[in-house]
Amino acid sequence: MSNYLTKIIYIPILTILLLSAVGLSFAQNTSWRATPKTVKKVNDYLGELDKIGYSGAVLIAFNGKPLISRGYGYSDVERKIKNSPNTVFDIGSVTKQFTAAAILKLEMQGKLSTDDKITKYFQRVPPDKSDITIHQLLRHSAGLSGTVGGDFEKIIEADFVEKVLNSPLRFPAGTRFSYSNVGYSLLALIIEKVSGQSYEQYLYENLWKPAAMETTGYTRPNFDKNLIADIAVGYQMEQRWGKPTEKEWDKTAPYLHLKGNGGILSTTGDLFKWDQALLSDKILSKEAKEKYYHPALRDDETGNSYYAYGWDILKTNRNTTRIWHNGTNRVFYADFYRFIDEGVTIILMTNKSLNSSNDTGRVISQIIFDPDYEPVVPVPDNAANRAFTDEIIKLTLEKGFDAAIESYKNRNKKIDLLENVINRKGYELMEEKKLKEAIETFKLSVFAFPKSANAFDSLGEAYLEAGDKKSAVENYKKSLLLDPQNGNAREVLKRLEGK
């Protein structure tokens, strides 16, 4: 599914701590200077990723100037076509911030209000959903299901709306956060109803064309024979998944399981144009952007970390703001980091489902902002390492942590564990309420990856879920020490320690 991953590495959205109350104010005049040493360090790291199979495109800009913009690996392995800055990728849930911007544009045009209830746009809304507002859809606080079908599953509009509206709410509207793709698909339908245009055409005329983005959309700019060649082929490990445009679509766009919440095609260059356009008022007004980044928040939130309108907002340890979103369908992956106070933009797109790729944006940002940080090159995500990781996880669950560690120590040194695979299994166990097993699994991760902030953060979360506050605090502190930008750990510690 088209997914949003706040902690970067396969963490279910239900585990995200999004604390907010008052809007963050952006710092001023804190532009970050790119030193030759920093640029070299980033390039060296990307070069190491290239050696272990990274496949995609990267753009990194300082103060409006891209200093790194290149491709890695192949957009089409069979035809030996290499990725480049012109390669078109599926950006997954990065799509959502476009949907949110379109809603705000319609509000600027006086055609709707984010306070409108969905009963204004949809008929036969059940009583338990009649108070849901556009604002709540944008912030994932409506209580709607996450999904009601697969990305490319055929469905007509009437059936989709009926299915969504008849699904049980996760919680009363407006009371909590729960990531919902279907909420953004409803927003896409509202855009079409209000504008009288297709979702894509409205976004093109009002967002992308003014930003000079001509390689962004589902079918725009009418992906002809020349441009189709630039669309990357997706690969699941080594197996060809294909191009998004080869999948089952509803004429010129995906069906509603994906439309509006994911699946937009774009390039690193076009997203950078969007990044720069948002720094001006030519597309969204100052007032609209204030709502975009700082919407009204719930009483139980603080202003340090929250989901805004299509963006995740975080106050960094430098007292600046990180504006971010990512997206994946487990084949393609995209990351979009915007440190607009500091003039730093990081855009990454991949077309090969290597779990290790998902942490690249965070690592690059840490290289940039922490001169003492030494990145660790991920373990190659190959068949041998995946099989070994599955074996050690199974041993952990069947015979215990000590037996697994003994086997790990005696391994063939040419194979190793994959942190992301362990992390994912730990969260699957947490969802199943197998907390003891989850803790043992995460302990395996921190043993094998003692320099991973995410490993300690995940173990802390498992301890917290199990009611062991002391152990949770201990591991969150270790995570924050390894990564001072880990806003999740910082916010949890504030809550647990009452600071």
Image (cartoon, rainbow, N blue to C red):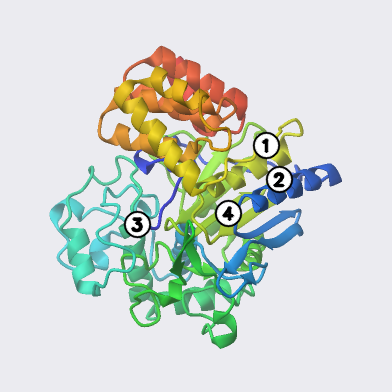
> Do the numbered discs 4 and 3 sit on residues whose CB atoms are within 8 Å?
no
Mark before the other along the chain sequence, 2 or 4:
2
The amino acid type of the residue labelled 1 equals Pro
- Badge 3 amino acid: Asn
Q: Which residue in the protein does label 1 denote?
A: 375
Between discs 3 and 2, the one toward the N terminus: 2
Task: Say which label, 2 or 1, has the lower sequence index.
Answer: 2
Q: Is residue 338 left or right of residue 150?
A: right
Marks 3 and 2 close (CB-CB < 8 Å): no
Which residue carries the number 3 mark? Answer: 181
- In this view, the residue farthest toward the top is 470
Near mark 2 (Cα within 10 A), the count class, few <14, some 14-19 or many ≥20, is some
Question: Could you tell which of marks 4 and 1 lies nearer the N-terminus?
Answer: 4
Q: CA distance from mark 2 to mark 4?
A: 18 Å
Q: Amino acid at mark 4?
A: Phe
Mark 4 vs mark 1: in front? 1
Q: Which residue is mark 2?
A: 45
Residue 439 vertical placement versus 320 (above, below):
above
Q: Which of the two labelled residues, at mark 4 and mark 3, occupies the earlier sequence position?
A: 3
Query: Is residue 300 at all visible to an observer of this figure?
Result: no
Label number found at residue 336: 4
Q: Give the residue displayed 36% in from the left and 60% down from the top.
A: 184
Crowding at dot 1, Cα within 10 Å, few <14 / some 14-19 / many 20+, comes out as some
Where is residue 320 shown, x and y percent of the image?
65, 39
Q: Are marks 2 and 1 in contact (CB under 8 Å)?
A: yes
Q: CA distance from mark 4 to mark 1?
A: 20 Å
Q: Is residue 216 visible?
A: yes
Inter-mark Cα distance, 3 to 2: 33 Å
Q: Given this view, does label 2 or label 4 mark the residue nearer the observer? A: 2
Which amino acid type corresponds to the residue marked 2 in the rendered image? Tyr
